[in-house]
Amino acid sequence: MALENKLGITSSADLAREEERISKKKALKLFEKGVLNNLPSGKFSTLQAIHKYLFEDIYNFAGELRTINIAKGIFRFAPLMYLQSALENIDKMPQSNFDEIVEKYVEMNIAHPFREGNGRSTRIWLDHILKNEIGKVVDWSKVDKEDYLLAMERSPIKDIEIKYLLKSALTDQVNSREVYMKGIDHSYYYEGYTTFKTEEL
């Protein structure tokens, strides 16, 4: 079954294809209109704005905090009861150098504030911080997707792998549309989330 959506699509495969098409188009507009230029780096409010912009034509919950607990495999993202305080703490985390920025990115991934579309939104958010703080962005075409997914899965325990992968792919082409769009590539999506009702956790 597909997530409830504004498009009236009931097939999850059809929804995934349409979601990718629409969110990529919106991501390009986000870049070309310079929307991010007026938003503060490293704040959850900025991530919310990115998510809403990408998904407002697809989901009613675009830009809104999830109302269910979610997990990937055996890993459970931040429980609902702690989600708001987790986001407030992430806002306060330092971001003056590469290591601090990636640590903040890892914590936001653990928080996973939205029901769907966290990966795409958070990668744009990450590059926005990197661009503003150290004048670099990630060239995602240089990041192997399997290595990335495995590194992100392990990052809550040990973040050395994800730091190494991303640092090796840094570029100063911060205004390149091609580099920017690689972060929206469908191949980096997380798959296989399981939803849990709050009372089950």
Image: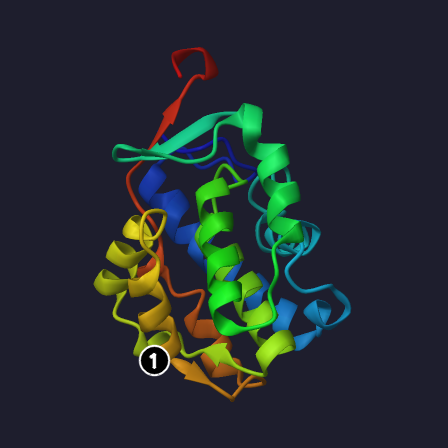
User: Which residue sits at x=57%, y=33%?
Assistant: 83
Q: Residues within 10 Å of mark 1 (few under 14, many from 20)?
A: few
Q: Circle 1 sits on which residue? A: 168
Residue in the foreground of this view, choosing between 23 and 125:
125
Query: Is residue 200 toward the left or the right of residue 67 in the image?
Result: left
Report x, y in % for residue 180: 50, 75
Residue 69 visible, this angle: yes
User: Picture quarter containing residue 70?
Assistant: top left
Say left or right for 200 vs 108: left
Task: Indicate left or right for 150 with 168 as reference.
Answer: left
Counting from the top left corner in percent of width and height, residue 194 is at 33, 30
Q: Quadrant of residue 12?
A: top left
> How many numbered discs?
1
> Where's the C terminus, which quadrant?
top left
Q: Residue at x 45, y 26 (%)?
A: 69
Residue 102 at x, y = what percent?
Answer: 47, 63
